[in-house]
Amino acid sequence: MLIKKIALLSGGDSEERDISIKSGLAVYQALKNLNYEVSLIDPKNSNLCSLVNFDAAFICLHGKNGEDGKVQSLLELLKVPFTGSASTASMLAMNKFYSKLIWNDRALKTPQFLILNKTNLDYKKIITKLGDPFIVKPSSSGSSFGINLVKNKDDLISAFTDAFKYDSIVIAEEFIVGREFTVSILGNKSLGVLEISSKNEFYDYNAKYVSNETVFSKPTDLNPTVLEEMETIALSAFTSIGCRGWGRVDFMMDKEFNLHLIEVNTVPGMTDHSLFPLAARHAGLSFEQTVHHIVDLIE
């Protein structure tokens, strides 16, 4: 596919708008350096029907209305090719409830979970199934918005209220104590395994985008067989949902070395704090080469 004129979508109206703008500016400069004709478009204040005038769209929208299949559906209707996963796969990956159902069906291990609503906030019943403490999160959200660690009854009410602000489906999830890893995927191939080491109780928004104490590194103490297993599981989790092009799969490893799938991110961040460009760099790709590869994968 010959692509010269690209619409770069960033900003939007989700809680992740600021991160999306940072990702978009970085990718915009890379595309300019690669000699593409690129226009930066913010869906919050633009008529997206104008996208028919472009050869393709590069999606740097994070969160709702950008990563959940909605803008992908519009682009499909407009017959404008775009980066990343198609609309259905994007929706499934964004919705942790749906993705967990698929992984359970494929025997891919993920933390146990329950759907919460205002009538079943029974702390004792929840800890009987999930253990104590546990995580409460919105089913469809990103950048750890609305995610809280619940340690008592009072925490449960406030955590549910917070998560419900972001999505009508709220999940209580088993809290896995251990090490956190991520596998970035480009062209259905792994870019390797990175470990996330945070001083926070879990990898929250502050740890992701603000703190300079969060460390991302290649794990050197793990057997190559374990690393290969992570990459295999990541690719299985990614393709089981129907994802394509590029993305990132996050794991927890418990103290018994069991791997637990947390989520698939179909539009990873591309900021200076982001994991995907770091993984690409470890794999020998510059930022511009990475962006060029993502464009080449447009279907």
Image (spheres, rainbow, N blue to C red):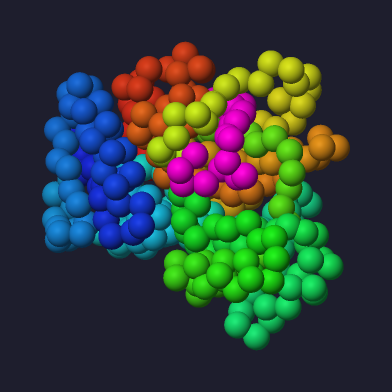
In front here: 119 or 78? 119
Question: In the image, what residue occupies the spot 73% across and 78% down?
Answer: 122
Q: Give the number of marks.
A: 0
Q: Residue furthest bottom?
A: 119
Picture coordinates of residue 36 (x, y %)? 18, 29
Q: Quadrant of the N terminus?
A: top left
262 lies above or below 256: below
> Residue at horizontal 15%, vertical 41%?
39
Q: Nearer the viewer, residue 285 or 180?
A: 180
Vertical placement of 179 versus 139: above or below?
above
Residue 274 visible in the displayed image: no
Q: Position of residue 48 (x, y in %)?
A: 19, 58
Stretch in magenta? 189-207
Q: Residue 30 vs residue 284: left or right? A: left
- Choose between 142 and 121: the one closer to the eye: 121
Q: Is residue 94 left or right of residue 54?
A: right
| Quadrant the C terminus occupies | top left
The answer to whether 258 appears left or right of 78 in the picture is right
Residue at 69% of width from left, 71% of height from top? 153
Q: Quadrant of residue 292?
A: top left
Residue 256 visible in the picture: yes
Q: Which quadrant holds residue 200? A: top right
Answer with the quarter of the image where residue 206 lies.
Answer: top left
The residue located at (66%, 31%) in the rendering is: 231
Query: Where's residue 288, x and y in %?
Result: 31, 22
Side (left or right) of 267 relative to 55: right
Q: Is residue 218 magenta?
A: no
